[in-house]
Image (spheres, grey):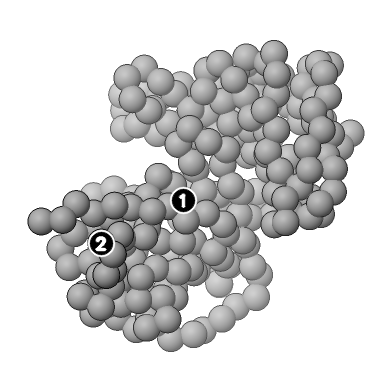
Amino acid sequence: MKRRIVVAWAGAALALAGCNAPVERSTGEEARQSDGWTPSPRIRVVERQGEGLVVRGDAPPGARVILRGGQDLAFAAGADREGRFELHVGVMPGAVILKPEVQIGQFPASGPERLLLTGGEAPVAALLVEGGASRRLSSGPALDSVDGDGQGVVASGRARPGSGVIVAADGGAEVAVIADREGRWTAALPNLSDRPASIIVGGVKFAYPGPGRVEPADQGSRIERSGEGWRVTNALSGSARQTSWFPD
């Protein structure tokens, strides 16, 4: 049996307009890649539709795409012949982390990203990236997210493509970054360990609450309201932890 190699695709956006394009069901073998590589699903759009959400993106044509949240929570649909998929997600009970998978035959393949969906008055849709900056999909303030691993802290956000952004933390040195062609920027904050801190982006101050904790009952992840935002704490290998905070 050939070893399956998963390629993670990046990039997503939140859209408010609806779309009812039909989705064809998986045909299994059509999704097999001739070079032996199996791309993981690429989530492009998270839309509100009624009281629920619709997740749209790309996958190998004919593949079955699954968003898995545990033993009792899963959403599935097939990619059409052009590789487009559409998954309808009902009302979320608070907040949930879903693992995107693509299934070809009997073999599921997942990438390094996880999809965070929260409800309430300040809903968040974001891709959690192990060891990297989160990618917020829903609208947000000047600061999209803060990610920390117990030692360092990375801030990220969106601005006009090509524009400059000034980021600072607790009165420390300012960090100047340039938004890429998608309007996204990321800034590593020097000399700031992962602790509560004030982070200033473009003159707007945000109170980062610091890292969270994961208890055995959390089964590897904890999602909670912390400060004025949502905080996700994920247990990685060994005692390593990663905290992702999304301000309102």
Residue 36: numbered disc: 2
Marks 2 and 1: which is nearer the front?
2
| Disc number placed over residue 115 in the picture, else none | 1
Question: What's the residue type where badge 1 is placed?
Answer: Leu
Above or below, 111 relative to 26? above
Residue 171 placement: quadrant = top right
Q: Quadrant of the N terminus?
A: bottom left
**Residue 174 appears in which quarter of the rendering?**
top right
Q: Specify few, some or many for label 1: CA neighbours under 10 Å numbering under 14, 14-19, or 20 or more.
A: many
Q: Position of residue 139 (x, y in %)?
A: 69, 54
> How far apart are the two marked residues, 2 and 1, measured between alpha carbons?
26 Å
The tag on residue 67 is none
At mark 1, the secondary structure is: strand
In the image, taking residue 198 as reference, residue 202 lies left or right, namely: right
Residue appearing at x 82%, y 18% in the figure: 173
Direction left: furthest residue: 1
Q: Front-most of 80 and 68?
A: 80
Q: Is residue 247 visible?
A: no
Residue 170 x/y as whole percent: 79, 17
What is the quadrant of residue 204 in the picture? top right
| Amino acid type, callout 2 | Gly
In the image, taking residue 188 as reference, residue 105 lies left or right, namely left
Residue at position x 81%, y 51% in the image: 162
